[in-house]
């Protein structure tokens, strides 16, 4: 009696549409990171991205506020609330750097046949290079703030915006890594869609 009940139970399991045995697939080999094939496009991306420093500095020179100083016998002193513009110019450069990082990451992600960690590193290095060159060349477009003659005591002079810290250069590579990582996580394919390119 036990055998007949077992046989009936097995036949009902096979006939039940919800108990179809799973289809076994041959496991495919996971795609490997290709460094040699991606190294030249990665160098090209990083080098080209560094050239974005010049539009970055130009936009910063247009948007960053100048700081006004009054000339005293002992030296220069900023007018009331003018010292806040030091932070304003730093924040503007930081936000523009984030935009540059997002742009570089988007371009790197659109290179479908080269997606992977090599391009991620290239995007981060390119964004870092663009931001660092931007800080080094910050005075390139600030010629309008040049003083023609020595000021007298009591005069108010307008000084060019400044960047007081180098820490601002981490904004661009951080944005590039975050955006590229979000795109890779959203993709969900083992090879990030390289074979579809």
Image (cartoon, helix red, strand yellow):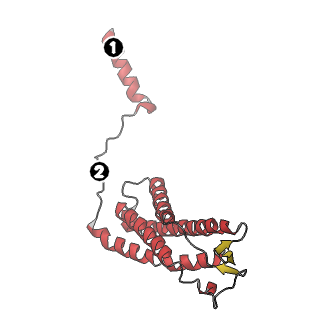
Can residue 40 be seen in the rendering of this structure? yes
Q: Which label sits in the foreground, 2 or 1?
A: 2
Q: Residue at x 30, y 70 (%)?
A: 39
Numbered marks: total = 2
User: Is residue 197 in sight in this rendering?
Assistant: no
User: In which quadrant is the N terminus drawn?
Assistant: top left
Asked if 138 appears above or below 23 in the picture, the reply is below
Residue 86 placement: quadrant: bottom right
**Residue 77, quarter of the rendered image:** bottom right
Query: Residue, x 36% and y 14% (percent of image)?
Result: 5
Q: Position of residue 123 (x, y in %)?
A: 42, 67
Left or right of 156, for residue 145: left
Residue that extends furthest to the top in the rendered view of this protein:
1
Q: Is residue 18 above or below residue 40?
A: above
User: Quadrant location of residue 15?
Assistant: top left
Whichever of callouts 2 and 1 sits on the residue coming sooner in the sequence is 1
Q: In the displayed structure, would residue 61 be above or below residue 168?
A: below
The residue identified by callout 2 is: 28
Crowding near pointer 2: few (<14 within 10 Å), some, many (20+)? Answer: few
Query: Residue under circle 1?
Result: 4
For image coordinates 45% across by 65% down, the residue present is: 109
Q: Mark 2 to mark 1: distance in Å?
A: 42 Å
Q: Residue at x 71, y 66 (%)?
A: 81
Within-10-Å neighbours for mark 1: few <14, some 14–19, many 20+ = few
Residue 190 position, x and y percent, is 37, 54
> Tag 1, which secondary structure?
helix
In the picture, which quadrant includes the C terminus? bottom left
């Amino acid at each position: 009696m036990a055998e007949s009940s077992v046989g009936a139970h097995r036949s009902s399991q096979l006939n039940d549409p919800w108990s179809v045995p799973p289809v076994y697939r041959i496991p495919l080999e996971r795609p490997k990171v290709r460094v040699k094939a991606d190294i030249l496009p990665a160098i090209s991306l990083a080098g080209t991205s560094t050239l974005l420093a010049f539009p970055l500095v130009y936009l910063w020179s247009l948007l960053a506020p100048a700081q006004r100083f009054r000339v005293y016998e002992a030296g220069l002193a900023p007018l009331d609330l003018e010292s806040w513009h030091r932070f304003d110019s730093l924040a503007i450069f930081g936000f523009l750097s984030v935009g540059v990082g997002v742009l570089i990451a988007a371009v790197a992600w659109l290179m479908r046949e080269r997606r992977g960690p090599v391009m991620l590193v290239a995007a981060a290095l390119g964004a870092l290079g663009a931001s660092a060159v931007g800080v080094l060349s910050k005075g390139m477009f600030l010629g309008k703030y040049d003083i023609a003659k020595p000021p007298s005591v009591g005069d108010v002079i307008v000084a060019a915006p400044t960047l007081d810290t180098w820490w601002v250069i981490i904004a661009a590579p951080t944005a590039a890594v975050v955006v590229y990582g979000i795109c890779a996580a959203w993709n969900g394919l083992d090879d990030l869609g390289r074979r579809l390119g």
